[in-house]
Amino acid sequence: MRLQLTEIRIAGFGGQGVILSAIVLGKAASIFQGAFATMTQNFGPEARGGACSAQLVLSDSPILYPYVTHPDIMVIMSQEAYVRFAPELKDGGIMIIEQDLVRVSSDLSKEIQVYSVPATRIAEELGKRMVLNSVMVGFFTAVTKLLDADAVRKAVADSVPSSFREVNLKAFEKGLEYGIAALTNAPISADAELETQYSPE
Amino acid sequence: MKADPKGVLTGIHFMDGDHACCEGALAAGSRFASGYPITPSTEVVERFAARVPTVGGAFIQMEDELAASITLQGAVWAGAKAFTVTSGPGFSLMMEHIGYAAMTETPCVFVDVQRGGPSTGLPTLPAQADMMQARWGSHGDYEIIALCPNSPQECFDLTITAFNLAEEYRVPVMFMMDECVGHMTEKVVIPPAEQIEVVPRRHTKKSVEDYLPYGTNGDLVPEMAHAGDGYNFHVTGLTHDERGYPDMTLPTQDKLVRRLQNKILNAVDRITMTEEEQIDGADVVVISYGITSRVAQRAIEAARKKGLRVGKLRLITAWPFPEKKIRELAAKVKAFVVPELNLGQMVREVERAAAGQAKTFAVSHAGGGVHNPEDILKVIVEASRCRTV
Amino acid sequence: MSDSLINDLVNPVEPFLRSDRIPHIWCPGCGIGTTVNSFARALIDSKIDLRSLALVSGIGCTGRVAGYVKLDSFHTTHGRAIPFATGLKLANPKLNVVVYSGDGDLSAIGGNHLIHAARRNIDLKVICVNNLIYAMTGGQTAPTTPDHSTTSTNPYGVFEPSFNLPHLVEAAGAVYVARWTTFHVRQITKAMSEAFQKKGFSFIEIISPCPTLYQRRNKMGDALDAMKYYKEKSKVRHGAPTSEVGMTMTGEIIVGKFVDRERPDYQTMMRAQYTESLGERYVEEPEMVCDCS
């Protein structure tokens, strides 16, 4: 599978498995797909408990510059992360959001494709809220078509404790299915998203 | 000698530089570390603390860096391969013991995951501003070796090299990482133990009567005895003779201090490692090290697209400085461009070695992030326009 | 030494000294040599395997002990004898490690290491020769210098309170704490022999004269006067609460064995913890490049 240089940012809050998601995707690319991946994360006081963000660069040639400057893809799991990072996303880029936690603003460029998934809810239905990152990773795999699904599946299995392997793999499949289904419908534009997904509670 | 398989985590890993450094130490045969927590280096010893009881060894978290940097030396004299890990403020506190290791010829490794300074500076953000401190930080005349990895894979590979050089030359080796490399996660391939070459201790086999703790032959590196071997040897930070006895006289000082320098300087060609690319016929050569070498690569490629003839020289060994190589190169190129995450440190060495034969351009950065490749590109363009000296 | 005639002629402590380094640097009347004599006798009495013995000193007059004993001996940096010794002991648990240093080295610049080694109960025998002053550098105030005495850096008299070292190390966790003066040569030997039998952090304070600086500056006479003072003012009180053994310039010196208790040492606790947590995965002994046993 050809893998052009792709910059990805994954952001949310502590406990959502932001870093683990980046590790799984990086591992899938670099170990199970024979490409290259560089993952960096934001350290510092802000990384304790609150906002959490990981940067991932994928390519089929060695990666030099390790940081993300203009992300092609963004996975956003909290409103705070959306406010902070959404403006960085490239026009024509892909934004993946946690459907129940992120509200897309009306000023988001129309050139951006937005895909949303209720990852937390799906994880809760599986009985383990903490596997929401595996749902996200599955969804990511489906909608971006960047990585080979089997490579990601292997990376999930390789990255979680053995006692949680099964539930994580289930979560991955759920996310993958949800993503494939989402692709058959047209991606939701920012406006449509606002109209259909959210009403004030 | 081959690595002990017990310490080698053979396989393909997706691992950060700090953890890879720890695995390198274990693969090199290190079974002792003493440390004190400091960002962004602590992950190295955290992993070591978890791993070492399963391979036979010890980690101790000491009360400060002064203690950490001498505890490891006690362990070395008891037979261990040992290291400590720190960052800027802790590195400053360790300076006296780098001098002690140099003077007593204690083979050991000091890992410095560089962050922004001075003082507390930028605990979580990268810099390369400890390069001169690594070389000159302790008082007196001495030589050390310093290596600069630019990826997690090199954090593994070169940590083994660091231990090997420490043993071969009985010298403290500075492992100059930076926050970026330390906290960057990439694929790290750890080969099987039988593919890892490890330099054993220069452990003496001489009889007690024949053994001179600081007597040397051609290579100027003495053989070592360990506490408990029965040699009843003496080790001191005072100026000492071949018996290891204090002898604070001018001839002994001259002989000892020159030997400590020459054992490294005589072996510069064997010690220094560089990575070169398109040097032949280049007008401008970009000299960089550590994380900056990867950032600079982007600028170099952009410059080549503009039709400029740009070469790359990466310093894998920063100290001893590859002076001869730079001097020879200076005769052939118009200019050197030296980007680094400090306000001008290794660039001074380049300028000194170039000795006016080629112009030297610094691309300084105060640290806290990496260069914007555009800033390096601008200087490459400027340098390539300059007249030959 | 098999020949009894030679036995009669050779000083019994001479085999423990680097005679090729004699004469030593200590001043006439200095008490450090006396303590070394007692130490050598303790080595004889305790029949300890000399090959297993390593001696570590810091910097200062007492720091020079490492240079005169015929053992694996390490003259380290100022204040850092204890952490160096900690590394020796942890890397090769079979070694018997003695730290031999002065009051300034151990309790001022090395004070942090002193209390933490005692807290961890590292199996080290610490011999602290306390001459109440910084002697090597010319008579400056130490953390042990008694109130009202005069030093080169307190020319108008010392006004800062001093450390009561037995109290400090007991509070920090030492398992064996004793104090003697250089008048008590046999008791010193006995205390050292006892410490060799003890597993854990042992601390022996030896009050020792510095005729050149402390005595002279304070008009306390010469070494003989110091001996007279030690003889007259020393009170043996084994088991005395260490809070009551603080010293003054001319008052009583409480001596004796103050603390002798059992606590698991660092390596015993370490092995127990790893065994409990790791089970069979724990590889017990460090495997070094050589076997020094």
Image (cartoon, coloured by chain):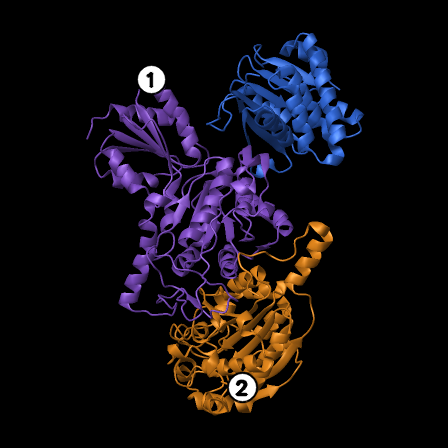
Chain colours: A blue, B purple, C orange
Can you give x and y, in whole percent of width and height, for residue C76 in the image?
Answer: 45, 65
Please name the residue that numbered disc 1 is placed on: B306
Instruction: Tell me which residue sits at (38%, 22%) in the image.
Output: B301
Please name the residue that numbered disc 2 is placed on: C185
Q: Dot 1 surroundings within 10 Å: few (below 14), some, or many (20 or more)?
A: few
Q: Nearer the viewer, residue B267 or B162?
A: B267
Q: Does B245 sit left or right of B39 as displayed? A: left
Same subunit, labels 2 and 1: the answer reads no
Vertical order, B114 against A153 (above or below): below
Which residue in the rendered view is the most extreme toward the left? B389
Q: Does B146 sit left or right of A110 as displayed? A: left
Can you give x and y, in whole percent of width and height, for residue C186 in the image?
Answer: 56, 87
Where on the picture, by quarter, is residue A82?
Answer: top right
Does residue A102 appear anywhere in the picture?
no
Vertical order, C83 against A75 (above or below): below
Q: Nearer the viewer, residue A103 or A201?
A: A103
Tag 1: residue type?
Answer: Lys
